[in-house]
Image: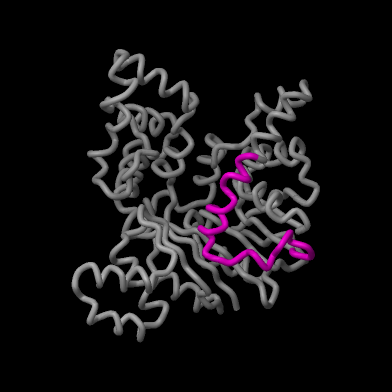
Amino acid sequence: MLTTDRYQRAAHVEALYTRVPFPRPFILDDDYEAARRSPSQADALRMRIAETADRTRATFLRQMAFDFRPYGRGAGLKILDAGCGTGNKAVFLSLFFPEAQVVAFDFNEASLKHLRYAKEIVGLANLTVMEADLTNDLPFSEEFDHIFSLGVLHHLPDPEAGLSRLVSLLEPSGLITLYLYDHWGRTPVILFNRFVVHLADNRPDDMDRIMRKFRLNTKTPGWFEDPVLELIDQEGRRPTGGLQDLVPPILFRALRRWRRGSDYPLYNNWDLCANPLVHLYDVDSIYGIAERAGLQVVSLRFRSGIKVDDPRDFLKETLRQRDLANLESRIDTMTDREVYVLTECLLRPNAFNINLRR
């Protein structure tokens, strides 16, 4: 499912990420220039990035639905981040596995420069940054033990061709970890994405005006659970209780924008609601893609408001809570694929991480 068949070219996606590199980089242009002028500023940036990595390590690795403990510090491992964008996850991988060889590539130099900033300032000697395009032949002769491609394939004109190129770089016993959009929970945002792209005819200035006039805030809790029109005005509503009751609404909103940063939530808005090329998937379609690529599904983790570590246990507990415990044995006889399908029906996830191997 595409946002619109009028913009089925990678060039349209590249234009989007040139205007708004994604995700929000660890080091912006002004940060980098300040760090080059001042050792103390560079130290502060390094400390901030290290603290962010430490704080998010457990969550990040858990979301990948894979047990990374055997990796240790990554000695002897070759890791690829395919379609790294501004490279925040590549930085994490380099820090999490300091003895691994990490290679990160993207087709957009406007994004890659921020990763190069981080490599220089943080001193990531184990990280190689390259410009390459997943829609074309890739300039690699080596194979990788673990390939990450997070939030990339669903923005390619031909996702299966992109996956095939990744498979060609995979060690025989290697693993591919993907992050893909799920059809069932992402419908509200895709509908608004269609609205923005079609109304603006994919013109960036008009898309920006539309999102701002709708006071769009994709960071609003419940974004994927509620109809778009119930959410797009959340940024303009005034919460109750606390500081907001002591100051005028206009001042409270100004303080909130200052605390978040002037660009909040610009980066997420553009990535989610102004993307001209989007594919959506569900469990069955992912299994089909894996089979056609000669891969097997190792594990899958849904991204939703409900955290589910074990889908079988989740389904059984759900049945027990609804006095349907007599059906628990049915869950035990199901394949992993069937369990994932039923779990997807209940969660309506907005995305999922999936691990694949030959």
| 156, above or below 49, in the image | below
Of 229 and 61, which appears nearest the observer? Answer: 61
Residue at the spot 46% in from the left edge and 43% down from the top edge: 271
Asked whether 301 falls inside the magenta stretch, the response is no
Asked whether 59 falls inside the magenta stretch, the response is yes
- Kindly indicate the quadrant of the structure image that contains residue 209: top left
Colouring of the image: one colour
Where does the C terminus fall, quadrant-wise?
bottom right
Q: Position of residue 225 (x, y in %)?
A: 28, 50
Residue at the spot 62% in from the left edge and 66% down from the top edge: 166
- Kindly indicate the quadrant of the structure image that contains residue 346: bottom left
| 138, above or below 257, in the image | below
- Kindly indicate the quadrant of the structure image that contains residue 283: bottom left
Q: Position of residue 179 (x, y in %)?
A: 50, 58
Of 171 and 307, which appears nearest the observer? Answer: 307
Q: How many marks?
A: 0
Residue, far bottom = 333
Of 82 and 300, which appears nearest the observer? Answer: 300
Q: Position of residue 291 (x, y in %)?
A: 50, 78
Residue at the spot 24% in from the left edge and 81% down from the top edge: 327
The reply, left or right, for residue 23 in relation to residue 225 is: right
Where does the N terminus fall, quadrant-wise?
bottom left
Q: Is residue 279 visible?
A: no
Q: Is residue 334 visible?
A: yes
Magenta region: which residues? Answer: 51-77
Q: Position of residue 190 (x, y in %)?
A: 34, 49
Residue at the spot 77% in from the left edge and 21% down from the top edge: 37
The reply, left or right, for residue 101 in relation to residue 192 is: right
